[in-house]
Structure formats: C-alpha cells, structure tokens
Image: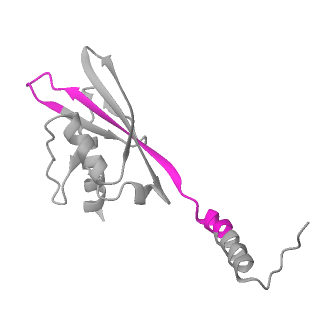
C-alpha cells in the first residue's frame, strides 16, 4: 500500500478540487417547473397560451385566467403562433422541455407542456418571463 505524499502537487490539487466541489453544494440550485397550457378561445379561432408556475390557480369561474398570459416590458400581451412558439420562447430563456400531454377541460382542448429549469431562486428561474399578474404587481410599486 502506497502512502499519499501531500507534498506532491497532484495530491494537493486533488484535495483542493474536493473542497471546492463540497463548497459548491452549499450554493445548490433547485429545479423549478412551468406548465404551458394552450387553451382554445371559444370566441375566435385563436388560442391562449398560459404560463403556470404553480403560484396561483390557472382558471377562474369565467374560464381562462388572463393574468397568466405573458406580456412584454410595456405590459402588452405577447401573442404566440401556438404552443411550439411558446416552447421556443421558454427554451430561449434556459428552460428544458420535459413532457407533453393533452386534456379536455370544460369542453376545451388543452395542450399541456411541462418545462423545468435549474436555478438558485424562483426569481432567477423566471427571469425574462413576465405575466400580466407580474406586470400589475410591478406597476403597484
């Protein structure tokens, strides 16, 4: 059996790497999820794309909760050509596709796509994505 000589540069480097890796786990990231819901608009041939981060209910008694649609920095709703367009929007912001499925809710076809992102905080995960609700909260300040 050979004894490790810590005067050796390689052994010191290995020890430093181990400490750095252990220290890195202190700043661990969490996995956050977002569900994109593409809901048919009964009043027209368009579709709503709802971004559900799990913080509030997606539906109200009248139907779709428009506060979960995405807006730009001026509060104007971003219209997506479909759920694939919205998926590209998420991918551009570092989110990864996990799974897709569809359901029927209140006689409406709903496509549901699940995305995930590793981040240190919810705010970091959601960076670059603003819903109508977020915009209203920002304007109150």
- Above or below, 60 against 97 in this view is above
Q: Which residues are magenta?
A: 21-47
Quadrant, the C terminus: bottom left
Please give left or right for residue 39 compared with residue 6 in the image.
left
Near-viewer residue (10 or 83):
10
Please give left or right for residue 7 compared with residue 1 in the image.
left
Q: Residue at x 46, y 47 (%)?
A: 32
Quarter-wise, where is residue 58 in the image?
top left
Q: Residue furthest bottom?
A: 7
Q: Looking at the picture, how far across and down is residue 34, in whole percent?
A: 39, 41
Q: Looking at the picture, how far across and down is residue 113, in whole percent?
A: 34, 33
Q: Residue at x 23, y 41 (%)?
A: 86
- Above or below, 35 against 130 in this view is above
Q: Residue at x 37, y 54 (%)?
A: 126
Q: Looking at the picture, how far across and down is residue 49, in whole percent?
A: 23, 36
Q: Residue furthest left?
A: 44
Quarter-wise, where is residue 4 in the image?
bottom right
Say if the magenta span includes residue 25.
yes
């Amino acid at each position: 059996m050979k004894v490790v000589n810590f005067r050796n540069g390689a052994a010191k480097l290995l020890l430093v790497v181990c400490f750095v890796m252990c220290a890195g786990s202190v700043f661990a990231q969490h996995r956050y999820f977002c569900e994109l819901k593409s809901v048919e608009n009964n009043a027209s041939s368009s579709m709503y794309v709802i971004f559900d981060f799990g913080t509030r209910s997606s539906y109200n008694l009248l139907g779709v909760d428009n506060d979960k649609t995405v807006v730009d920095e001026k509060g104007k709703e971003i219209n997506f050509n479909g759920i694939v367009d919205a998926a590209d929007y998420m991918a551009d912001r570092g989110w990864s596709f996990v799974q897709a499925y569809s359901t029927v809710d209140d006689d409406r076809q709903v496509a549901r796509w699940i995305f995930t992102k590793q981040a240190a905080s919810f705010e970091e995960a959601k960076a670059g994505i603003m819903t109508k609700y977020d915009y209203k909260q920002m304007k109150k300040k």
